[in-house]
Image: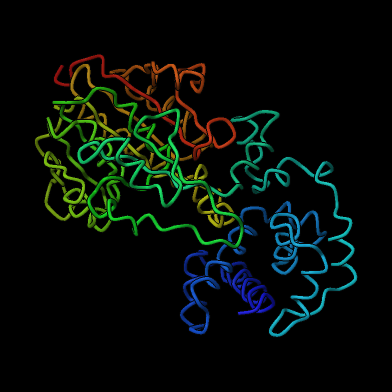
């Protein structure tokens, strides 16, 4: 495909996402299935532009003076991808292009509106209704935090210490230019590709099939590491999902003790056993909701209950930018109710001295500090404890001792972690 056709396809997909409120993944898939003529490089290029427009939809629209998908695509090419105005104009006028640039578009590309005059929500590329939440979380730097959540994300990898070590894993990933990460010795990072470039596939590395490493954001890895020394312990991953944090916890346990994986939706657990086999995990017991009373017998026995709670996903907007525009106040309220329910459920499984580790991939206080505070009011058997004593992480602790990560401060996805210790016997 020529550049003009790629730009036109991107605008078509962005329009589909906006008018039909479709997830970007489904809109891109639908276009690809209907456009068999497009090669893999074409699809990567188009996907890259679509996602970049979604990341910065508000600030791009502000600079152009128009919020339409076409304006966003033109602005992303010029301001983010570095295309000269003449190149954009030639591509749009060319074969299969979206049409010649208007005088207004030419003027906006030449002399865009200054972002300094825009509101924090526009500069930070998030919905207006979330501005109060961002102000609570980040104060005067909320626009900068939002902008960091609109950057392209790197590919982070967790080294599986059940199968290999950091030196061997790094050598195996040499073709993808992986680098070590200072915050965790078992983490590696592959930088985000340049615009329009296709990222190298981790799955093509033979060591991936051997289970040497897993794709997992650094923030998620840090959240799992907060469990601390858990070798020989009884651990319950209560919202296991696809098993990413389950596998991280199992590796920290070195196949000692027992880790139980549960999720309220059985389909989310479907891949966990296969992934665990590949990773060499031998101390995992999957408790599926398809069975009656799947968690029977675990009450009051767990030393760690890990709760990766359902949430808005606002901390992962770098990877899923379309979700921030679909998030609503009603959806947020439902997630908060889910979080209260799963905290109350998890509280029944910890033994005296055991810990609940409450985690979200959200930056919103309503899902984080507020949920913990409400839980502690409901349940006086628990007390908050500092989330980490690791010197590399203490700088990210809040005054309450919770761990808050964000792209601007820690170069991770946005994550929140609270540690709640059971201070009374559940049988008392």
In the rendered structure, the answer to whether residue 130 lies left or right of residue 242 reads right
Residue 223 screen position, x and y as percent = 38, 32
Residue shown at 21% from the left, 35% from the top: 236
Task: Decide which of 262, 276 is in the foreground and name it.
Answer: 276
Task: Decide which of 336, 227 is in the foreground and name it.
Answer: 227
Vertical side of 159 occupied by 26: above or below: below
Q: Residue furthest left?
A: 297
Residue shown at 21% from the left, 46% from the top: 279
Task: Decide which of 354, 157 is in the foreground and name it.
Answer: 157
In the rendered structure, the answer to whether residue 118 lies left or right of residue 373 reads right
Residue 73 screen position, x and y as percent = 70, 65
Q: Quadrant for the N terminus, please.
A: bottom right
Residue 200 screen position, x and y as percent = 45, 57
Residue 6 figure quarter: bottom right
In the rendered structure, the answer to whether residue 314 lies left or right of residue 128 reads left
Residue shown at 19% from the left, 51% from the top: 278
Q: Quadrant for the C terminus, please.
A: top left
Residue 156 screen position, x and y as percent = 43, 44
């Amino acid at each position: 495909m020529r550049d003009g056709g790629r730009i036109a396809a991107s605008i078509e997909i962005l329009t589909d996402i906006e008018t039909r409120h479709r997830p970007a993944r489904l809109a891109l898939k639908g276009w690809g299935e209907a456009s068999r003529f497009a090669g893999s490089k074409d699809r990567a290029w188009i996907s890259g532009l679509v996602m970049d427009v979604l990341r910065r939809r508000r600030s791009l629209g502000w600079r152009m003076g128009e919020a339409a998908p076409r304006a966003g695509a033109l602005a992303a090419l010029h301001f983010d991808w570095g295309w000269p105005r003449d190149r954009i104009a030639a591509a749009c006028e060319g074969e299969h292009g979206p049409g010649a640039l208007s005088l207004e578009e030419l003027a906006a590309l030449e002399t865009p509106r200054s972002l300094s005059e825009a509101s924090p929500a526009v500069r930070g590329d998030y919905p207006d209704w979330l501005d109060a939440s961002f102000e609570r979380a980040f104060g005067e730097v909320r626009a900068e935090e939002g902008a960091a959540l609109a950057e392209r994300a790197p590919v982070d990898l967790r080294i599986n210490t059940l199968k290999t070590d950091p030196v061997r894993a790094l050598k195996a990933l040499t073709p993808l230019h992986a680098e070590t990460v200072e915050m965790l010795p078992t983490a590696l990072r592959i930088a985000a590709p340049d615009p329009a470039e296709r990222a190298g596939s981790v799955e093509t590395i033979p060591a991936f099939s051997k289970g040497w490493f897993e794709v997992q954001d650094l923030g998620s890895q840090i959240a799992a590491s907060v469990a601390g020394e858990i070798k020989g312990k009884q651990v319950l991953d209560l919202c296991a999902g696809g098993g990413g944090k389950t596998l991280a916890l199992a590796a920290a346990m070195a196949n000692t003790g027992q880790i139980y994986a549960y999720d309220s939706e059985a389909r989310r657990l479907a891949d966990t056993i296969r992934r665990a086999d590949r990773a060499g995990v031998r101390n995992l017991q999957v408790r599926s909701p398809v069975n009656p009373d799947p968690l029977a017998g675990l009450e009051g026995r767990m030393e760690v209950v890990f709760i990766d709670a359902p949430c808005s996903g606002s901390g992962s907007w770098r990877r899923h930018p379309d979700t921030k525009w679909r998030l609503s106040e009603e959806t947020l309220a439902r997630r908060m109710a889910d979080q209260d329910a799963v905290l109350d459920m998890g509280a029944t499984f910890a033994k005296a001295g055991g810990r609940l580790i409450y985690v979200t991939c959200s930056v919103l206080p309503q899902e984080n500090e507020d949920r913990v505070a409400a839980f502690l009011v409901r349940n006086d058997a628990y007390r908050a404890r500092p989330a980490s004593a690791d010197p590399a992480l203490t700088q990210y602790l809040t005054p309450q001792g919770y761990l808050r990560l964000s792209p601007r401060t820690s170069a991770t996805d946005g994550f929140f972690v609270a540690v709640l210790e059971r201070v009374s016997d559940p049988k008392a």
